[in-house]
Image (spheres, rainbow, N blue to C red):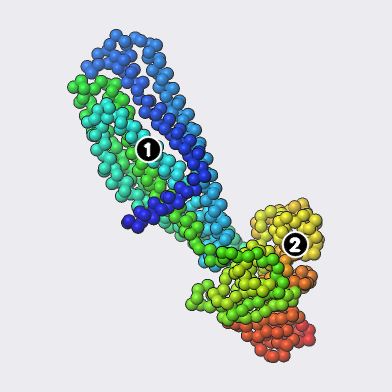
Amino acid sequence: MEAARGSRWAVYGRALRYYRPHAGASAAAAAFVLLAIGANLLKPWPLKYIFDIVLGMTPSGAASPGYHDARTLLFWCVAIVGLHLAWGAFNLVNNYLLVRVGLQALARVRRDLFAHLHRLSLKFHDARSSADSMFRVSYDAQAIQSIFNRGFSSVFSIAVTFAGTVAVMAQMSGKLTLLALGIAPVLGLAIWFYADRIRRQSTTISESDSALSARVQEGLSGIRIIHAFGREEYELNRFEEQCLHSLRANLKLTFSHVSSALVVGTLMAAGTAAMAYAGACQVMRGALTPGELLVFISYLAMLYEPLQSLSYTAWALEGAAAGAQRVFEVLDTREDVADRPGAEKLASARGGVAFEGVCFGYDSARLILREVSLRVEEGRTAAFVGATGAGKTTLLSLVPRFYDPLAGAVRVGGRDVREVTKRSLRAQVGMVLQDTMLLAGTVRDNIRYGRLEATDVEVERAAKLAQVHDFAAVLPRGYDTEVGERGVRFSVGQRQRIGIARAFLKDAPILLLDEPTSALDPETEAAIMETLRELMAGRTTIVVTHRIATVHAFDRIFVLDSGRVAEEGPGAELLDRDGIYARLYRAQTKPSGRGKGEA
């Protein structure tokens, strides 16, 4: 419990750091809180003067001669409205300032979280659902705002209101004040009892709702395969099961809230009843006037309201702490592929790409790559081929530092990629992937993603080189046509050409191609390969592919088997060796009736 409490306060402290740049606005909000509390403490007094002066009520209930003073009565009635208006105006300014500061802090934490997610390596993202990360940015981050707006700012207001109310009540009647405060220790125990429970249940809800979002994302992104296999009912059942889990978690939290509200409300009622009985007895003995009792009862409501608010604030803080903890879990995740201190800018990629004794695995117990050593000369073409799971794509991913090897080194231009900045390294690398991802925006925006500062003329030149211009020109709005979500309005071949146009526009000296034609029909593949040959000219190029025929004429072919380089050399030489490459080549060419000489 002590460790949990320490962790909780650490979360609160970290959340409040996001408010330091807005200290001035927070101080202004605090000033208006004090003014609002002052106006609120004055609100009951006009009633006392109406009862005791205008009506002239004595403890026996008899009226005094001031009963018919209409102007005095009007003055105090206007005072009631004026005090309420002043209180409302101060609260309005205070609430606006607090909400603005809270939203600014929320924007900062979302930016930090989004930026950190992009800095983390693919190993992190491979291990978790993207929907969970989205949920933390969109929803869990709101806890930072709640901790301040519904938490500490409320605690400040509650503390000042409570202290001011107790001070005024004590001046009127010390005995009644002590009686009214009698429920405070019991109320504190109730708050403590429910707080930890609510925090645990709030954490469960966040995790459940995150899983629910992941289920929705998976169901919608895979809508084609779901329809293809007629699995709508199956997916609906899985979704309903997750909904039921979320429902149970929310019902548990709801029961905790309503039961705690019942306990707190009952304690308040008991305190009010005890004070009303004792106060009425004092009026009957002449120790208090009816107006004073009325003011005292009004202050009792003011006393119990912050106590009740304190319970809700404590539970809101516990719920917010659960969400904030999930945010800080991501922010605390170590950037395992980070720029080293003193990393230099990679000015040139001259010298090609080399792998020296590279070992890699997602954990050290299961290696995917074992002692891989190879070299691709500058301006030459090379291919990684082999069976599925041999480690081809993993090896390619080490060049731009999507991952770092567990042992050995990857060198670009003679420099260990870990000794240069990631930004400068990736500036030297262009990539075309198997499934080109199109982002929200226009065709022009997606091509310009290769070099954001490129002009429209440069974009269209790259589009012509990649054979995008022909189909882009006949689109409804040409290059300014929206691509739709993930580019589903375009064929696979069209998306691939847009990806190639990006690479043309980037004009990087190193080109990495990961299965660029595996999803294409033979005719489209032939056209894309013709475009790629133009792109590869003069660049250090590495291609990962299962299509042996497309790379048979490359300068160098590396055959990977169980994470090792089993064979290497030109295609014709590897055929003569009659090893793994020859078997793969024959397996792919024999069904189509092609022989060695037809490659």
Look at the picture and state if 579 lies above or below 170: below
Look at the picture and state if 586 lies above or below 277: below
Residue 96: percent from left, percent from top:
51, 36
Q: CA distance from mark 1 to mark 2?
A: 60 Å
To which residue does mark 2 refer?
Answer: 505
At 49% from the left and 61% from the top, the residue drawn is: 333
Which of the 4 image quarters holds residue 351?
A: bottom right
Res. 567 visible in picture: yes
To which residue does mark 1 refer?
Answer: 158
Q: Amino acid at mark 2?
A: Leu
Drawn side of residue 118 relative to residue 573, left or right: left
At 58% from the left and 59% from the top, the residue drawn is: 118
At 56% from the left and 64% from the top, the residue drawn is: 341
Residue 265: percent from left, percent from top:
31, 39
Drawn side of residue 230 relative to residue 462, left or right: left
At 52% from the left and 72% from the top, the residue drawn is: 362
Position of the C terminus, as image quadrant, is bottom right
Residue 74: percent from left, percent from top:
40, 14
Drawn side of residue 555 relative to residue 416, left or right: right
Given the current orientation, which residue lies at the most extreme front position?
342
Q: Amino acid at mark 1?
A: Ile
Res. 243 visible in picture: no
Look at the picture and state if 102 lies above or below 69: below
- The crowd level at tag 2 (other Cα within 10 Å; few <14, some 14-19, many 20+) is many
Which of the 4 image quarters holds residue 312?
A: top left
Drawn side of residue 127 relative to residue 574, left or right: left
